[in-house]
Image (tube, rainbow, N blue to C red):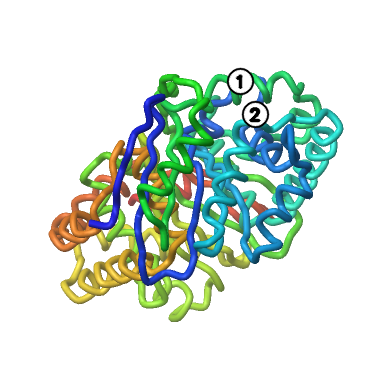
């Protein structure tokens, strides 16, 4: 196994995945907090903090941070999810120590300059506006709001313009102080890297990361129902959602196979029946979002509002059929697709870093590829039909964004999907 783990004296975990055939290195910090861990009155602060880490430290300006990596051909980026935040740089192997120094400087010495903070708030407000102008993105936020009403996990990762504009600097600093500690953080290095040398680099720069315990968020509660938002656009954007297994649950494997079989590829059932045979959509797909204590199975489609009823009827037919009929050919094809995705991801330095960071936060240990593939291979036709029956016989979460004039009400849609 190419993965090695060391724990520093302050409790900080350092993990590497050596890829000697690679021509680059990814250095990053994965932090086990996101939207779900924000204060009630500070929705969006996790994402705002992510932005501010790039806006200057005690010894580097925002421009100096970016040029320190980019002048050597590297790149830096970050992302925030509902449960994690990650910061990473991809560089040539000879620049590993430089990247380590930059990531450490950002996470430990960012100053959150008030002028930079005000400017970055405006950038995020523009980002929120872009999201609102992209119905295929915004409809997913609406779906989370409906699935998790009055819960932090259901709130937008970006926050709202009003909240972001008024967020005090002290709230952002307090969020970092509370959550950016060894109990929540993993330092990851992947690619053409030496574990011992990397650990020495991290020990030198991250030794002052404070100790702390990871905060357990409130337990998620999924609520079925409908959120239908009228908007004068050309297409109706529709998501049908169902409670699904969390990422600790062994049932997540057949759920993943089901999502690929049903709508994960151009040969999947929904793509063939809905798009190829009836021309009801340009885009239709299904997927599973797995969190620490809950999951969501989602089917997304964009369609002509006048054809929404037909679309929902066809989807309902397929959901009922997959609970009774899964043939060996399509099962093998779905499993082959997942297997290929997993193995091809092993060629990507960034993908391996992201997987490793997530697994260390989620499970406390790396997950061997062989273990994943073994569980995948064991998924049977009966397993897929069983998880499909468990998911699709429940009342759905229905989210729609677009012209609603010809869309039926939630009760009628739910009946179309389950009867």
Q: Residue at x 80, y 25 (%)?
A: 166
- Residue 218 position, x and y percent, is 43, 22
Q: Is residue 262 visible to the viewer in this orientation of the structure? A: no
Residue placed under numbered mark 2 in the picture: 43
Q: What is the number of callouts on the image?
A: 2
Q: Do the residues labelled 1 and 2 touch (CB within 8 Å)?
A: yes
- Residue 360 position, x and y percent, is 35, 41
What kind of element bears circle 2?
A: loop
Position of the N terminus, as image quadrant, is bottom left
Residue nearer the viewer, 396 or 380:
380
The reply, left or right, for residue 32 in relation to residue 133 is left
The reply, left or right, for residue 382 in relation to residue 172 is left
Q: Residue at x 53, y 34 (%)?
A: 34
Query: How many residues crowd around disc 2 within 10 Å: few (fewer than 14), some, or many (20 or more)?
Result: many
Residue nearer the viewer, 358 or 295:
358
- Residue 287 position, x and y percent, is 41, 56
In the displayed structure, 8 sits above or below 30; it is above
Classify residue 111 by image quadrant: top right
The reply, left or right, for residue 380 in relation to residue 281 is left
Q: Is residue 169 visible to the viewer in this orientation of the structure? A: yes
- Inter-mark Cα distance, 1 to 2: 7 Å
Q: Which residue is drawn at 40% across and 45% down?
A: 358
- Residue 115 position, x and y percent, is 86, 32
Q: Residue at x 71, y 52 (%)?
A: 66
Tag shown at residue 299: none
Tag shown at residue 40: 1
Query: How many residues crowd around disc 1 within 10 Å: few (fewer than 14), some, or many (20 or more)?
Result: few
What kind of element bears circle 1?
A: loop
């Amino acid at each position: 196994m190419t993965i090695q783990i060391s724990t520093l004296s302050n409790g900080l975990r350092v993990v590497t995945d050596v890829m000697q055939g690679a021509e680059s290195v990814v250095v990053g910090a994965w932090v086990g907090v996101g939207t779900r861990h924000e204060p009630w009155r500070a929705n969006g602060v996790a994402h705002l903090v992510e932005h501010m880490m790039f806006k200057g430290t005690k010894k580097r300006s925002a421009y100096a941070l970016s040029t320190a990596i980019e002048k050597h051909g590297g790149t830096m980026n970050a992302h925030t999810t509902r449960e994690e935040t990650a910061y990473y740089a991809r560089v040539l192997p000879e620049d590993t120590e430089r990247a380590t120094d930059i990531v450490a400087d950002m996470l430990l010495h960012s100053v959150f300059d008030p002028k930079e903070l005000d400017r970055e708030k405006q950038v995020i407000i523009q980002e929120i506006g872009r999201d609102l102008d992209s119905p295929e993105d915004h409809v997913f936020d609406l779906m989370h709001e409906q699935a998790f009403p009055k819960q932090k996990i259901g709130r937008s990762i970006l926050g709202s313009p009003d909240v972001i504009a008024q967020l005090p600097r002290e709230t952002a600093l307090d969020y970092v102080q509370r959550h950016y500690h060894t109990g929540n953080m993993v330092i990851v290095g992947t690619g053409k890297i030496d574990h011992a040398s990397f650990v020495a680099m991290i020990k030198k720069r991250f030794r002052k990361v404070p100790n702390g315990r990871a905060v357990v968020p409130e337990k998620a509660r999924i609520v079925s129902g409908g959120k239908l938002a009228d908007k004068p656009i050309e297409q109706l954007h529709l998501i049908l959602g169902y409670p699904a297994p969390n990422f600790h649950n062994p049932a997540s494997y057949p759920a993943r196979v089901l999502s690929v079989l049903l709508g994960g590829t151009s040969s999947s059932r929904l793509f063939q029946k809905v798009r190829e045979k009836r021309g009801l959509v340009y885009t239709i797909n299904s997927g599973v979002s797995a969190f620490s204590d809950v999951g969501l199975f989602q089917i997304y489609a964009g369609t002509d509002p006048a054809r929404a009823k037909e679309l929902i009827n066809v989807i309902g037919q397929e959901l009922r059929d997959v609970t009774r009929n899964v043939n060996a050919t399509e099962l093998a094809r779905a499993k082959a697709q997942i297997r290929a995705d997993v193995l091809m991801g092993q060629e990507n330095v960034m993908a391996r870093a992201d997987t490793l960071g997530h697994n260390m936060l989620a499970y406390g240990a790396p997950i061997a590829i062989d273990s994943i593939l073994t569980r995948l291979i064991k998924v049977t036709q009966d397993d897929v039909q069983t998880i499909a029956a468990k998911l699709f016989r429940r009342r759905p979460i229905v989210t729609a964004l677009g012209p609603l004039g010809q869309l039926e009400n939630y009760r009628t849609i739910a009946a179309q999907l389950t009867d």
